[in-house]
Amino acid sequence: MAIRDEFPRLAAAEFDEVVTHSYVRDVALASGRTLALVTLDNGRDHTRPSTLGPATLFELGDVLTEQRARGARGEIDAIAVTGKPYFLAAGADLSNVSAIPDLETAAELPALGHRVLGLLHDAGVPTFVFINGLALGGGLEIGLNADYRTLNAAAPAVALPETFLGLVPGWGGATILPNLIGIERALKVVIENPLKQNRVLKPAEALELGIADAMFGPATFLESSLAWADAVLGGKKVERPHVPGTLERTVKWPIAIKVARDTLRAKLGEVPQAPYRALEVLELARKDDRAAGFAAEDAALSELIVGDQFQASIYAFNLVQKRAKKPAGAPDPKLAKPVSKVGIIGAGLMASQFALLFLRRLQVPVVITDLDQARVDKAVAGIRDEIEALRAKGRVDGDTAKRLSALIAGTVDKADFADCDWVIEAVFEELSVKQQVFAEVEPHLSETAVIATNTSSLSVEQIGATLAHPERLVGFHFFNPVAVMPLIEVVRTPSTDDATLATAMRVAKDLRKNAVITRDTPGFVVNRILAKLLGEAMHAVEQGTPFETVVEAQRPFGFPMDPFVLLDLVGLKVGAHVLDTHHGAFPDRFFESAALHELAEEGVLLEKDGKGNARGIDKRARKIVAKHTPKDAVPLSAEELRIRIEDGLADEIRRMLDDEVVAGPEDIDLCMILGAGWPFQMGGVTPYLDRVGASERAFGGTFHSPRIAGPAARETASVAGAA
């Protein structure tokens, strides 16, 4: 019976799958033995990785079944699997997974993966996987199911990213890996790395962890792997020092799981489902019972596949992978002006971060200026120290470090900006200050130079009101820390011309950032939404709602930190300024906070331990807020406050879309994911608001179709529109 007959629901389902075929050829090894080599290839060029959909697995299963039979007949001595150039496999075809219609069909997918990849275990002859390139998710699990693995030293990435996408490794990864490399190393691969913005392993790291048994260079990878396999068949011993022993299984394993669970609760709360389901499987793996582990993987994966969080994760994944690469409203890239020198106005911390980023990514001369030479010299020295630190860590080589250090210069003479193509300010967030520094530098600039402001909430148009050429001014709002945060809000004023906007988009791309174009409006996207969240939080405590109740009200949003920890991170003075700006622009919808101003003056909000971690609200902060609470104030319950915030967000975002602040709700979601850490598994703020009914309550519609929004959304046509 063909394997597809064992899985009738998947076999009958209609998927738009690019099938990865399994091509077999026999390889005569030097010893005279014969190895059946299965090569996975989807027939596409080298830019599209092979993926593993149902049809692909059916074919691979039939091929492996036949090779096992050949081994039993003595026709071959071993089975090996590898991939087309540059790729083993990028895992399951996520577009197909997200289209699975029901729980019964979903339950067949992990079972199919276990059935097929499991054919590489106890095959009757030794099995090998030659990881010749990218190996993600199910691609890596092909290797884990085999007896032995080799790895190409040039493979771009090795990873199990499932928990990042709202799933668990469901084809053996969560069960086999900890029994191969130990629980602590497995926790890093399955939980820690995916939740650090989907961090992947380089080949040397994967080898050190024990995921692979040997690593070879790309020029002779296949030949070396075949020779190594021949040696293993001839009796070569393969050392695996990280395989867990009795002590680890009985003592260290439960402790590691507990620490991981406590860490998840502290960092993510309990809203995300996938990491906790993965922990359950990893905990069970301690018994080294594949059948029980695979059954647990089957149950977890089938339930998660049809759940809201996975659907939301796929929506977020597509935003980051597709929309972010083709920004809505961007002009023709050919209009972009070349940038061969950068000027930075300011020499503080933010300016220094800008300088280092421009140096590393553009590798062009960068000049910074400030009020006095001492401040400039200190900044230049600090930037060079940062470059040296990068060299010491191996992030750049010695020659690159010398070149970058030579490219940075400081000056107090604005005439030194004459040959700059791109000039950006990083000065105090005050309109008159920004206008003044641009007034001082503009007379020295060439006619083609682009001027950028990093303002987070001021009007870009007003900043450029005194410029002789406001058409070359653009908002270029970074998020802190500059080197880490992937978003830049590119702000177009009514005067900004297409060449300036195109240049800004090109610069953002060259800096390896994702740019979203916004209108010139208070707070742009991220700060406007955060002002709503933080403003509601401060207003609630000023009305007598306990701080703990406010935290509980926002917990369902899934943010990695509560609103008061976020406020402390942003800075109390910055937070107060942002609230004031939005209250001034929209006094009927945004709160100002007298209590926050006093908290900022006193510099107190959180009680912290010796390591700087928040332990709760400081008693002094509670007293300050209580002073500002009216006698007739009415505290809210967590449920009342949550609904109030959700409805307020839905109303505000609809207004933003009506005012064409961005092209569509997807851009707001992208900004919040990349700029504010909106959780991937929540899928963006607008699908969340649809799911919980806030969109319907606020304006009688939804931002998205029910398919995107999730099963809780009503079948109402979108009134906001989707790009």
Image: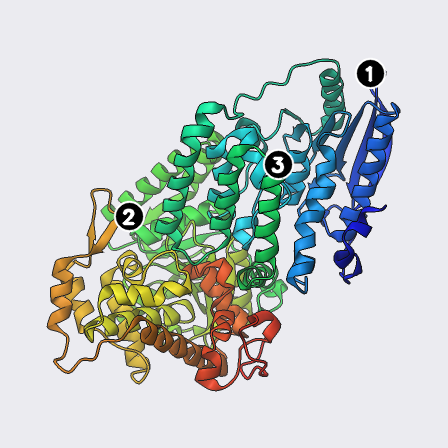
| Three-letter residue code for mark 3 | Arg
Q: Quadrant of the N terminus?
A: top right
Judge whether residue 430 can be spotted in this image: no
**Vertically, is 295 above or below 256?**
below
Q: CA distance from mark 1 to mark 3?
A: 35 Å
Q: Is residue 466 left or right of residue 58?
A: left
Pick whichever, 217 or 397, lies toward us: 217
Q: Is residue 676 left or right of residue 113?
A: left
Q: CA distance from mark 2 to mark 3?
A: 62 Å
Residue wearing tag 1: 30
Q: Secondary structure at mark 1?
A: loop
* Coloration of the structure image: rainbow
Q: Quadrant of the C terminus?
A: bottom right
| Three-letter residue code for mark 1 | Ala
Q: Secondary structure at mark 3?
A: helix
Q: CA distance from mark 1 to mark 2?
A: 66 Å
Sequence order check: which comes first, mark 2 or mark 3?
Answer: 3
Expressed as whole percent of the image width and height from the top left, the position of residue 585 reads 32, 81
Label 3 Cα neighbours within 10 Å, binned few <14 / some 14-19 / many ≥20: some
Residue wearing tag 2: 376
Q: Secondary structure at mark 2?
A: helix
Q: Nearer the viewer, mark 1 or mark 2?
A: 1
Expressed as whole percent of the image width and height from the top left, the position of residue 493 reads 45, 75
Which numbered dot is residue 290? 3
Residue at coordinates 28% horizontally, 70% vertically from top-left? 537
Residue 559: quarter of image: bottom left
Q: Nearer the viewer, mark 1 or mark 3?
A: 3
Residue 648: quarter of image: bottom left
Q: Nearer the viewer, mark 2 or mark 3?
A: 3
Pick whichever, 723 or 482, lies toward us: 723
Pick whichever, 251 or 383, lies toward us: 251
Pick whichever, 152 or 446, lies toward us: 152
